[in-house]
Image: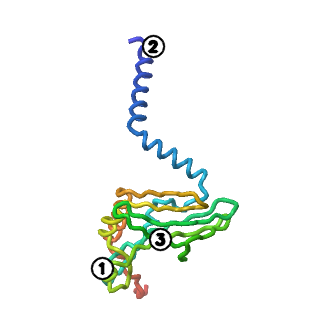
Amino acid sequence: MTPSVAQYAFIALGGVVLATLAWKYPIIIWNLARTSLHNAFSDIEWIDGTHSIHSFSYVISRPHNQALVEGVRLKGRNKRNRAITLNNFYLRSLVTGETIKGEVNNLEAEEVEIINNGTFSIAFRFPNEDGRLTNNTISGITFQSFLERFGQFEIVLEVDGQHHRLLYDDAKTKEWVTSVQMGLMMPAPGEKATALPRR
């Protein structure tokens, strides 16, 4: 095999690999490009991102050995040099179709104005349907109920009349639940000693 033939063979092999990758991952490449473009022109910068484990809110009752899913919380910042208005915002299950209205900075409101460069927190709290398991010392739904009813959901935000949709598939919700449950299986830290032998 001459060097020129080997060179053409490597070029052809590279082309085949590139074509295979482009054919196998067009959706991933398209989604990455679309997300990057959307973030560049979006009014909102999401602190910690929209799919971080920190956006998943749960509560624990140690005496009852019970943990419940409280809701989903997103922290954002208006990155514009002008105020923006959150006209409407809700979480909608793609499994059952039920919707949950959101709160901004713990305030229930239909329209909320966010000042320029202002930070805010949007919370979507699940109904207190399983709080009875802890004598209502905490509120929320069980992890199993969360996966069955909200295994796939979307958050819809209407900002200055424009709709933004954040999709959460069952892979993400299962990842959230698994991460939390693994953390709950870890032994609780022991109490710090208050009496030590004098040396």
Residue mark closest to the camera, 1 vs 3: 3
Q: How far is the residue under mark 1 from the one under mark 2?
A: 71 Å
Left or right of 125 in this view: 78: right
**Within 10 Å of the Cα at label 3, are there few (<14), some (14-19), or many (20+) other Cα atoms?**
some
Q: Specify whether 178 is left or right of 75.
A: left
Name of the residue lying farthest toward the top: 2
**Place of residue 140 in the rendered image (x, y in percent of width and height, measured from the top left):** 37, 76
Residue displayed at 32% across by 86% down: 135
Q: Label 3 near label 2: C-beta < 8 Å?
A: no
Q: Residues within 10 Å of mark 2 (few under 14, many from 20)?
A: few
Residue 173 occupies quadrant: bottom left
Residue at mark 2: 4
Reading the chain from its start, which is encountered first: label 1 or label 3? 1
Using the image, tell me which numbered label, if any, was put on residue 101.
3
Q: CA distance from mark 1 to mark 3?
A: 29 Å
Q: How many marks?
A: 3
From the image, state whether disc 1 or disc 2 is nearer to you: 1
Which label's residue is closer to the chain start, 1 or 2?
A: 2
